[in-house]
Amino acid sequence: MSENYLENNLDPEFESILKTPPAYMGAWNSAKIIKKIGRDIIYPLIPTPPDPEVAITTRLIPGPSGAPDVPIRIYEPKIKKSPLPGLLLFHYGGYTICDPRYEDTRCMQYVKALPCVVVSPDYRKAPENPAPAAYEDCYAALLWFAANAWELGADPERIAVTGLSCGGGLAAAMCLMSRDRNGPKIAFQMLDAPTIDDRLTTRSSREFTDPRALNYDTCRKIWNLYLGKGHEQRDDISPYAAPSRALDYSGLPPCYCFVGELDPHRDEVIAFVGRLAGAGVSTGFTLYPGAIHAFELEKPGAAISVHAMATAIWHLKRALGCV
């Protein structure tokens, strides 16, 4: 859609992006740029101040067979009554940039609001490590969390998965993988504008072209880095890489999903939600008018962002027995 469409339909509290697009928009121009410049320079980390109520630790856990150990970041209340629910959070970044530190604010918010124990893996990134590296690392983190939940003060029967953008895609993938591999029980999936369809054939994926927000060209570059060029024409792409390609959604955990009206992911998410519900999976969904991709990350204090996070937290609390 035209630049005027974005200007005319954008939530007024987000008008600043029309002059200063999100910092991540220039990250995926080419694999050479990522390798040469470095991820921290492309999208600098703004450290989150420590929270006196939340303890953060890091450690290495066993990776997939034959692969390196996976670094994880653990967030937990400094004072807690065990066992708490667990939340496995996969960070955003188009499968290529960022790490769990970029999600410190959100993870600490979940720890305090539920409360819960959050584990976030630093999965391997494309283009150096394309699929299946990321989702296999994340599954290794799920296996480890479930096996070590009691040690962390968490209940292995109350572990949910969540993530924003590609993190949401990885969370959806974990539900498919755990079902197919007879893995740990996942209590709930909370998906925030998940990146789930590499084919980019929906109306929203093709019509949003404005360079000031996530758009078709950026999505195409991300998928090319993760799956290789020509992926959209292949029929052997794993549904764990692109969950929209899964043929069967039955037996998956209950889900809550939300996405912005001006997000290229909008229509693939709507289709995903419909297929979940059609497969008998209890599913909730919110479409936020006037909102771009990752709107609550760009403007966390905006009214629509506050509503989105409060609603997501309510769904997590309800699903994990915290209300």
Image (spheres, rainbow, N blue to C red):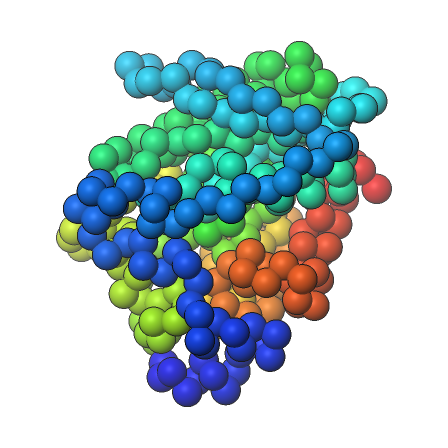
In the rendered image of this protein, does residue 15 appear above or below residue 83? Answer: below
| Relative depth, front residue between 196 and 292 | 292
Q: Is residue 19 visible?
A: yes
Q: Quadrant of the C terminus?
A: top right
Placement of the N terminus among the 4 image quadrants? bottom left
Q: Is residue 271 above or below residue 54?
A: below
| Lateral position of residue 308 relative to residue 63, left or right | right
Q: How many marks?
A: 0
Asked whether the viewer can see residue 283, the reply is no
Residue 303 point in image, percent of width and height: 70, 68
Q: Position of residue 220 (x, y in %)?
A: 26, 59
**Residue at the image point whose x is 54% and y is 53% from the top:** 192
Where is residue 132 drawn, in percent x and y? Answer: 30, 33
Q: Position of residue 174 (x, y in %)?
A: 47, 35
Q: Residue at x 44, y 76 (%)?
A: 19
Q: With 312 as the anchor, is 68 left or right in this view?
A: left
Residue 28 image-quadrant placement? bottom left
Residue in the image at 50% along x and 42% along y = 102
Apparent side of residue 79 relative to residue 86 in the rendered image (left or right): right
Q: In this rendering, is residue 47 above or below 266?
A: above
- Which residue sits at x=22%, y=41%? 35
Above or below, 95 relative to 3: above
